[in-house]
Amino acid sequence: MEIPTHTELTTIFPSFVMHKHWDMPEGFNERLTELAIEDALKNRITEEAGERNIGDTSNHLGHLRHNFLTDCRAPEVAMLTRMVDSAVREYLMLAYGYQHEGEIRMMGDALWQRRSHGENIGVSTHTHLKADIVVTYYPRVDLDGESENALRRGGVRFYDPANVGKRFWPCNNPSYYTGGWFQVEPRVGSMTVFEGHIPHDSTFFEGEGRMCIPIMVDVDTPKKHCKVTTSDILSFQGQISK
């Protein structure tokens, strides 16, 4: 017996990771690395109780809140800013079919990982919930070679925000990934773009060092929160803030 049916299949709550490679002119990545190293050293935590401390002095991830993109004035930083702007707009179009015409706000710093200082151990799993989108750019990736162990190549791993991971059946749809984690192995010129709520980390790498420039991005739209400080609201209302 044939029974007429109507079927709809909808993808709900998807997550996207964009991996883009830039073939930059000779000398660009080298100079950008130099600038980023200066920034990383200048913004290491030196006082345990500093108001701008992010983290602490116990490891190389601790740094001062700042914005590399505005603290360092150089043609390479200006170019990186344009690259990030372009990539974010490309991401929004590819993932959501949305052509963003408005402004994009950015804040960047520099993560310098050196084997000589025991810093090639990777980064623990974390998110950036206060950022709409996260962009990372790698101007320097100095590895000994391609390790046979996939967990020793400095891969950036992205996890399912719903913490579902693998299913008990194979996924043969090339448009979707359902593994335990999705891994990108950066090389010089690599850029990743993803939304801030996606959990991610990076693995140990066998090599002299790596420079990662993470950039927190907010996309200005008419729907963005229009939050105002308490004192400004009370001033507008004609009251004295106490």
Image: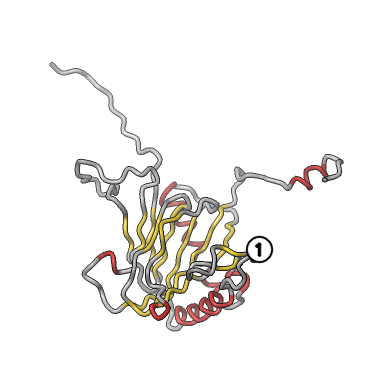
Residue 224 location (% of width, % of height): 61, 45
Name the quarter where the C terminus is drawn.
top right
Q: How is the image coloured?
A: secondary structure
Asked whether 14 or 200 is in front, the reply is 200
Q: Quadrant of residue 121?
A: bottom left
Asked whether 211 or 6 is in front, the reply is 211
The residue depicted at 44 percent of the width and 47 percent of the height is 97
Q: Quadrant of residue 117?
A: bottom left
Asked whether 67 or 98 is in front, the reply is 67
Q: Which residue is label 1 attached to?
A: 51
Residue found at the very far top of the displayed protein? 1
Residue 185 location (% of width, % of height): 32, 66
Which amino acid type is shown beneath numbered disc 1? Glu
| Image: 5 above or below 127 | above
Residue found at the very far bottom of the displayed protein? 27
Asked whether 216 or 60 is in front, the reply is 60
| Image: 104 above or below 11 | below
Circle 1 Cα neighbour tier, 10 Å, few/some/many (<14 / 14–19 / ≥20): few
Left or right of 77, for residue 49: right
